[in-house]
Amino acid sequence: MATAPGPPDALTVARVVAYGLRGRIMNVPNGHTDVLTHEHDATQALADRADFVVSDLLTAAADHDEDAEPVIWRSRILIALEDIGRGLRLWRLAVALGWLDIKLQFRGSSVGPLWLTLSSAIMVGAMGGIYSRLFHLVLRDYLPYLSISMILWQVGVAGVTQDACGCFTRAADSIRSMRLPFSLQALRMLVRSGLTFSYNIVVPIGVYAIFGLLPGFVGLLALPALVIWALNAFAFALLLGSLCARFRDVPQIISSAIQIAFYVTPIIWNVQQLGARGRWLIFNPFYSLLEIVRAPLTGSAPSLTIWAVALGVSMTMWAAGLLVFSRSRARLAFWI
């Protein structure tokens, strides 16, 4: 006795939907393309991303089958990891695009990207002279600390955060025009931030050279810390880039929060000025991340507690970035 065929699986349905939409696009009558332009763009994007449709269909199926929930989460995360893997294989393109962004930013300027170095030098020199008098500090001791703190904050924290918010929205034309891994835009932002950091780090190096200061071998501890910073920047781009593509008010909220964090983080002032109350700074996530890079460059090794907090914050950020990106990836092309 023949058995009735079961319902088609989600992957089969997704393929039928995708190819049906593609066929609808190909059958648009001549002379009507101007009327159906918006519909054409939307359906073409959906057809080109059949895996997005698969993810959405699996999500809908989960509403009726609780046992399917782990499979859906696993499929989304695996698709996101595959996207990241494809983006890493295109690292040469990310480097070229990041460098192109820097060149376009200073197009027509006779000095070019060196303005990054000059503006940072002027800012550090002016702030060092003012705040050393206000805090009654010796300039030889205060200026090196201020220079490395300002560059790390301005480029590594505030700059990366602002770039991460616009990671996908600023690349909307590229995302719409060609099918590339979304993680490539995060790598592009990472390269751009790295190049900006390389131009700005010249200022603390010059200050150290003027005062004859050398961090010694302990300064090598800043290298693994910078690797952690690079991974954090990539995860931050996936996290904030996805959130800001969906909710356009998030960049303004993040900008205001960064301004407040600047004053409660030891950048223009140091921990010793707080005395015994300085122990509460361990609850400031920016402090631990900043200290694992700054302390070696100022000649002291960070404590194990600071390293533990920095790694904990970083792992939380990586997990959040992967989770948000995996859930948002299927809709990014439509949000931007």
Image (cartoon, rainbow, N blue to C red):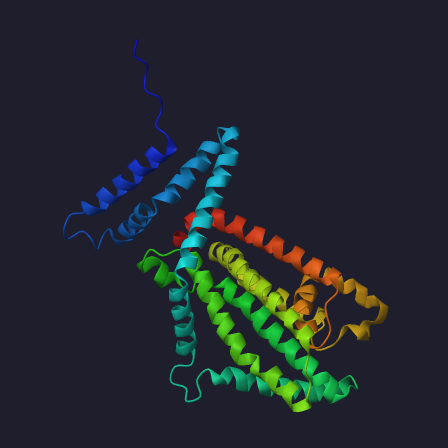
Judged from this view, the residue extending furthest toward the right is 276
Residue under the point 65% across and 85% down: 208
Q: Residue furthest front?
A: 217
Q: Residue furthest left?
A: 30
Which corner quadrant of the image does residue 291 belong to?
A: bottom right
Of 29 and 292, which appears nearest the observer? Answer: 292
Q: Position of residue 90 (x, y in %)?
A: 39, 61
Q: Position of residue 309 (x, y in %)?
A: 70, 58
Q: Give coordinates of residue 299: x percent, y percent.
A: 71, 77
- Please tell me which residue lies in front, 206 or 323: 206
Residue 160: x, y in percent? 54, 67
Q: Is residue 121 above or below residue 234?
A: below
Q: Residue 286: in sight, yes or no?
A: yes
Q: Is residue 28 left or right of residue 237?
A: left
Q: Residue at x 36, y 24 (%)?
A: 7
Describe residue 123's horizontal placement relative to residue 92 as left or right: right
Position of residue 113 relative to residue 176, above or below, is: below
Which residue reaches farthest bottom? 210
What is the quadrant of the N terminus in the image? top left
Q: Quarter holding the C terminus?
A: bottom left
Q: Using the rendered image of the protein, determine whether residue 297 is visible from the camera's viewpoint.
A: no
What residue is rendered at 51% in x and 62% in y? 165
Q: Looking at the image, which residue is at 57% across and 54% down?
A: 318
* Total labels drawn: 0
Q: Is residue 219 above or below residue 35?
A: below
